[in-house]
Image (cartoon, helix red, strand yellow):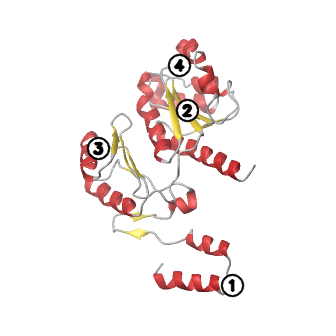
Amino acid sequence: MDEGSIKQWLAAYKNGSIDESEIVQRLKNLPFEDIDFAKIDHHRTLRRGFPEVIYGEGKTTEQIIAIAHKLHESGEVVLITRLDEDQSRILQKEFCPAKANLTARTVTVPAIKTEGAVSHSSRQALVITAGTSDLPVAEEAVVTVDAFGYNCDLLSDVGVAGLHRLLAYRERIERADAIAVVAGMEGALASVVGGLVEVPVIAVPTSIGYGASFGGVSALLGMLTGCAGGVAVVNIDNGFAAGYMLATILRNLDRDKSAGI
């Protein structure tokens, strides 16, 4: 989309031939930026509420840096997932400030400008893990929620092998507006939490477990067939998807509140 087209829209709006909603709708479909090996969607936030995120695995460090610079120049927060330690160090040197989480395998580059960015609200997400081994996936979820401008707490190692540990944090759990439960093995913790709360619960199966866990398939099937209502399931080890959904829930809660619903 070139400058002339935008000026034509504005002129049409000025003379009353199109209205404000039509302008917004057209802006939602503005083109992406083509840098040969990537097509960068600068208007993801306008359509989806959150900016495009870079999935680092399978990309070269040079490709990641090039994409990240383009997103950063547009003023958006830049979240990069599934990085190795060398890539994280390089990105921290390339972008200042940049925050790396080696457990989550992420790097977050803050937005250049605050106008139009998502601001922190009083809404609270909570990520719960069954075991310490689930932390890499859980922290990916936490980092994602935080990058999108919302508060996220982490409660770890409270799996069903010692259920009293979970119940000791009952009040903390009940304060959350949305919850993600990260568990491997048989994935039972998601049903337990789902049976305790009235808010949406996102179950995240992990590949943690012995042979018959089949790399997370057992946890996935257990979560899919769980008996607690109000529990949705994302893919194995997909902390990012859980974090994205948590942030989406919180954003819609804020939007409903501002609309008086």
**Residue indicated by mark 2:** 126
**Residue 45 at x, y percent in the picture:** 52, 59
Among the 4 quarters of the image, the one containing residue 162: top right
Are discs 4 and 2 less than 8 Å apart at CB? Answer: no
State the mark number for residue 256.
none
- Amino acid at dot 4: Gly
In the rendered view, tell whether residue 36 sits above or below residue 247: below
- Outermost residue on the right side: it is 261
In the rendered view, tell whether residue 261 sits above or below residue 211: below
Mark pair 4, 3: CA separation? 31 Å
State the mark number for residue 16.
1
Rate crowding at label 3 as few (under 14), some (14 to 19) or many (20 or more) other CA atoms within 10 Å: many
SS type, badge 2? strand
Looking at the picture, tell me which residue is in the foreground, 223 or 80.
80
- Amino acid at dot 2: Leu
- Amino acid at dot 3: Ser
- Amino acid at dot 1: Gly
SS type, badge 4? loop
**N-terminal of the two: label 4 or label 3?**
3
**Residue indicated by mark 4:** 159
